Amino acid sequence: MKKENNSLTLIILSLALNKIYSNFKIYESNSSDENFYINFGCDEQVSFNDFKKIEKEMSKIISGAYKIEKQGKTYICNNIKFNGIDLDKKNNTKELKFFTLTSIGGVDNLGSKNNYRIYGNGFDSQNEKEEFLKYQEELRSRDHRKIGQELKIFTFDDLAGQGLPILLPNGSYIKEKISSYLKSLFFKNDFEMVNTPVLGSKKLYITSGHWDLYKENNFPPIKIDNEEFMLRPMTCPHHILVYKSSNRTYKELPIKYFEDAKLHRYESSGGLIGLERVRAMELFDTHIFLKKDQIKETIAQLSTMIKEVFSKLNMKIDRIDLSLRSKEKDKFFDDDSMWEESQTMLREILKELKYDFYEIEGEAAFYGPKIDFQYKTILGKYITISTIQLDFLLPKRFEITYKDQNNEEQTPVLIHFGIIGTYERFISALLSQTKGNLPFWLQKTQVEIFPINNEFHLEYAKKVEQELLKNDLRVKLDSSNERISKKILNAQKSKIRFQIIIGDDEVKTKTLSVRKYGQEDSTKMTIKEFIELTKKE
Ligand code: ZN
């Protein structure tokens, strides 16, 4: 019934806006279980500050008991027509009990003097409304854009270009730590690193099929001399060319490549969301070339690697989806027997690995089925962290081969493997999930030391700093003249895990006064005990 309440609120809001503003006009309206929105125009300027006035008018409309009539798919109330909504049983404005307006933003080029979009929700009970507002508050406190700004992780600048993120030193540090961890894990698992250019010829993407299928997501080609180049949207074709650079035999397979690959994809400016949806991104991208009879053992190996990464990042695999082709076959590479075979194969492998999984139709890649490993966020949303995609198509398109035991040419299978997706999206999820209280190993500064009085305590504080540095902790000694309470407040704001305070007593007893992020009290301990404590992080 959520959609119905949202639809009803949309009608009531429109009637209220029509009453308050001149030349009110609806350009688009939509209602779902999640919320409703209307795009509208009017002569006056409208802002968040007007919500009180609008809500008051809405209450009047509710008690005014306006009748709502249905004509086909259109609803009519007080001579205003509504589309994109759904009322099940309710047909009068008095049937709405509770509502809230959540946001207002400007919309370009609708055609009126001033153009806006308002979002809101309707509810059956006060309780339902309060739950919703609590959730909204939680959502705001986990907004990675706000956290990223507070912790100086990333920035955007219109001069650099919309949707093009700039990672600041703190963000670059996180990225580098994750990258070097992944590289060492992948080297251990017999992957090789490659480096390929950020531009590719248009022909390359015509061959791969990305040109046709992702036209609207590609940046337009750059013409130079007689060649056309593209900012690459993905790395697969390049890695195929690495494979193709030598003659391959069955003995070499599986061949596994990885690369920290910078990619570019066009997103409409309205679709850009902080680091979550950007136009320039970096993907830890990997491709595996193998024989058909190696698929099972390889997927087993990859899923072990996925488990290791999830546990290193304090995450749990909450759901596995097997993404299949849908009945609308034209979105997918046309080869029924290939799809039948590869889908059956993945299904069997997942069963053998004893995974519980959901089969989702229509979510496959255009070249083949995939397995998505998902994580459930604190807000209850599932996000895909890792993906294993089976591909029989691109090897054929690029005519890559290997020689089998009988010296005959065969086509290898390709697996596209993403372990954490793009760094940008991953960091945005990490910030939201932890509210910026990052895993210890990703913190640029892990410990901050504050001598209370430089004259008496700095010397011992320096000794402590040296000892901690020797133990591979990332330490900052703050001997500025700022008040100690201010220093602690700043360290809490930047979410540094441990603050060490050094005063008379600590110097005398050779101890530390340690306060952990988020805790009110500090604890006395020796340097050795503190080092042990950090090992548990
Ligand atoms: Zn790929």
Image (cartoon, rainbow, N blue to C red):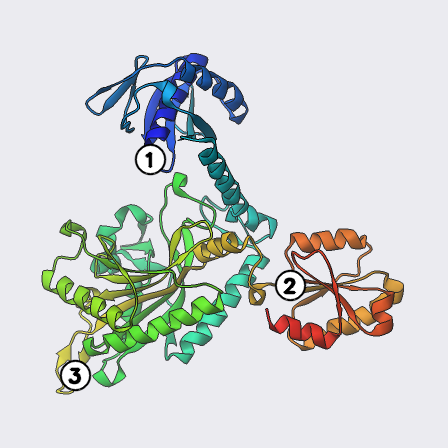
Location of mark 2 (residue): 445
- Amino acid type, residue under disc 1 in the picture: Ser
Q: Which mark lies nearer to you, 2 or 1? A: 1
**Location of mark 1 (residue):** 32
Query: Can you identify the residue that label 3 sits on?
Result: 404
Name which of mark 2 and mark 1 comes first in the sequence.
1
| Nearer the observer, 182 or 531 | 531
Neighbour tally class for label 2: few under 14, some 14-19, many 20 plus, Cα within 10 Å: some
Asked if one can make out residue 158 in the rendered structure from this viewpoint, the answer is: no
Instruction: Answer whether labels 2 and 1 touch (C-beta < 8 Å).
Output: no
Q: Is residue 314 left or right of residue 536?
A: left
Q: In which quarter of the image is the N terminus?
A: top left
Q: Position of residue 69 (x, y in %)?
A: 26, 17
Q: In this view, does 301 lie above or below 367?
A: below
Which sits earlier in the primary sequence, circle 1 or circle 3? 1
Secondary element type, mark 3: loop
* Residue type marked 3: Asp
Q: Nearer the viewer, residue 298 or 86?
A: 86
Mark 3 or 2, nearer chain start: 3
The residues tagged by marks 3 and 2 sit, at their Cα atoms, a distance apart of 53 Å
Residue drawn at the location 66% of the way across and 58% of the way down? 517
Mark 2: amino acid:
Thr
Residue at 39% of width from left, 73% of height from top? 305
Rendering quarter of residue 8: top left
Q: In this view, does 352 lie above or below 477?
A: below
Q: Residue 388: image x %, image y %?
A: 30, 65
Which image quarter is the C terminus in? bottom right
Indicate the position of residue 465 as horizontal and vertical percent values: 74, 71
* Quarter of the rendered image showing ligand 1: bottom left
Q: Do the residues labelled 3 and 2 touch (CB within 8 Å)?
A: no
Q: Does the residue labelled 1 lie within 8 Å of ligand 1?
A: no
In which quarter of the view is residue 323 placed?
bottom left
